[in-house]
Image: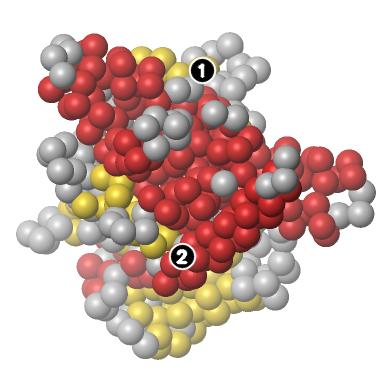
Amino acid sequence: MNRPVQQYLRQATRGLWGTKRREVQAELLGHIEARAQEFQLAGLHPQDALHRTLTELGAPDQIRRGMTHVYLAPVAINGVLMSTLAVVAVLTLGMLASGRAQVSVYDPSTSSPPTAFFVDREELLDELQQRGAQVSGSALQPTIVFPGYARAVHVDWTKSGQSTTNPQDQRTYVSVNALTSAVSTAGLPVHVQGWTNPTLLLSSLPVQLGDQAQRVDAFALYNPVLNEVVREVLGPGAAHALLATLSADFEAARWTAATEKVEHTLTVVPRPGVVYALLIVEPGVNDFGTRHIPHAVFDITPDAGDGTLRFVLPKKYTHLQLTGRVPQAREALRLLARDGDAARHHGGPWRPAVALLIELNGNLGQNTGTYTTMSIDRLSLGTSKPK
Amino acid sequence: MDANLLKGHLDLILLSILEDTPKYGLEIIKDAQDRTDGYFDFKVGSLYPALHRLEQAHWITGDFHPSPRGGAPVKYYQLTPAGQRELQRKRDQFQEFTAKVQSLWRFR
């Protein structure tokens, strides 16, 4: 699509989000192309025809204001009626009119667990700009300067697996994990708040992921943190060529529909803003029976509201030795690597799997207190979970 | 024409234009111009939000169809049964209003 047209459509639909935004953009694009074609038939050069069409359309801000009024005003009016204080009403209207940053999410993953969180590139960058960030560079290698931070963030979505096209809407979706990693590498804070439809805080700019129509959870956002935990379990001597990017072959039963599963239920004192991970690290064995990168079995869950945690693992892990001590997990890994028989029975009654219980506090920054291990030392017996 | 006059009767005008056949935005603009000798000249900035408002009110529905001249699909709008009733109600209201205003001038 032509760049001025793209820019016009973006500006005209600011404040809308998700399907509605795309629908209005598609409608305006239909109008633009049809009108430009008429001008061309009347003898204008294609570029002149387009220029004239955009001029005739008028300021994109006029459409944006009108559309915002149609889709956000009813909510704002409710806010006013509910409020007895005029000042509160004014604030409510202001907040709604500015629109909360929400971007569409797409899960292209056929693997388990999902390797990253993918969002609409155009919507993401547009919302960041609207929030005051300066974006330059190319579409898949943007440079972003966040308000209050001089240091530029260089994002690279050209690498394998960092961007994808959704065949349903033909739009480009990019990895949020690549973005959070770039922001963190530049020394800026990155946090995730909430579990269902979480809010990502990039420096201080909030980006809400998902909505009522498209519910998502924060699971895949924590992949880099889990990677760090596995690195710590492996210890400094476990250098491997693949470890530069991936510390293990990850497996999360929650994401496999076909296999039988086992559920481990634990109780903790509920803490706001914290989600929990259970992690087992085993020696990896490839299809030829030779050594491979380690195998990490894990699950992440928030508490159910009353401190209950329900972790879902593959069916073989019926017996767990819960621990908060990384050296114990490292030692278990070392012993398993030496004893193939023990590895075969790992997770069963004869050889409970050492599982680390971890608190994730929402910090996604690199090596800056992204997790803490919990103080626990007991057995856990899982119950069979229906498919 | 006076923009306030157009604004005050925008729903009636749009529902009237869509009464016979489904139309997309550009067609609506042209139809309004052609049928009124250029008296009604819609601006895109006010037309599309108005169409979406009518759609939200369930008086019209919109569907994307291929553009008659190729290119990106266009969104055709048509009246719903509720829109037909609303058009009739607004038309009656307008005719009554016009008649009453005219009756004020009859004996001048």
At x 64% / y 31%, what residue is drawn? A204
Q: How many marks?
A: 2
Quadrant occupied by the C terminus of chain A: bottom left
In the current view of this chain or complex, which residue is farthest to the front? B107
Q: Residues within 10 Å of mark 1 (few under 14, many from 20)?
A: some
Q: Closer to us: mark 1 or mark 2?
A: 2
Query: What's the amino acid at mark 2?
Result: Gly
Seen in the picture, residue A65 relative to B78 is either above or below; the reply is above
Residue at label 1?
Answer: A134
* Quadrant containing the N terminus of chain A in the rendered view: top left
Residue in the picture at 53% in, 70% down: A322
- Tell me the SS state at disc 2: helix
Residue drawn at x 50%, y 66% as measured from the top left: B88
For mark 2, what is the residue?
B83
Q: Where is residue A78 in the image (x, y as percent from the top left)?
A: 74, 57
Instruction: Using the image as rendered, state which of residue A226 and residue A319 is in the foreground.
Output: A226
Amino acid type, residue under disc 1 in the picture: Gln
